[in-house]
Image: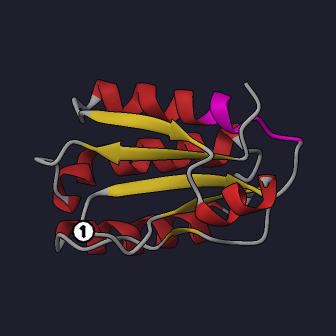
Amino acid sequence: MRARSGHVRFDKKVRWKNLVPAFRPMFLKFLEETGQLPDDMESIDVLIEENLRDLRSDRKPEGYNREGSMRMIFPISDQVEFYLYSRGKVLEVARVIEQLGRVLQKYHLKHTIEWDQLQFLADKKD
């Protein structure tokens, strides 16, 4: 499957703070699978801790919105969700989302996955 974005929506019972145990392994898996894991792990540890601080306070985290081939975005929304967006065609969003889905299942976080649901992507297809 070729998708430019994958959208993970959590069950309505899931709150931001429920993501705390799964966030570090999920985030590291995202960076590893997308080839964005830097040699300097200290900077990543700081970024993970900033995201965890928000999650522990039951707030939406920052995610990973850096220059690179793929981004992990937590949109402003009434529900707990995030999406991956690939700017290039090199990486397979579907493969990465499936890997993250396995991490989420391991932590018993009920979720659904949708493909290419970003409005600006849908507009470009028409």
Quarter occupied by residue 71: bottom right
Quarter occupied by residue 22: top left
Which structural element holds mark 1?
A: loop
Label 1 sits on residue? 78
| Residue 98 falls within the magenta-colored stretch | no
**Magenta residue span:** 90-96
Q: Nearer the viewer, residue 25 or 100?
A: 100
| Residue 93 falls within the magenta-colored stretch | yes
Q: Quadrant of the C terminus?
A: bottom right
**In the image, is 22 to the left or to the right of 97?**
left
**In the image, is 114 to the left or to the right of 54?**
right
Please tell me how crowded label 1 is: few (under 14), some (14-19), or many (20+) other residues with Cα within 10 Å.
Answer: few
Where's residue 107, x and y in %? 26, 32
> How many numbered circles are shown?
1
Where's residue 19, x and y in %? 26, 51
**In the image, is 86 to the left or to the right of 15?**
right
Where's residue 92, x and y in %? 76, 35
Q: Quadrant of the N terminus?
A: top right
Q: Nearer the viewer, residue 89 or 59?
A: 89
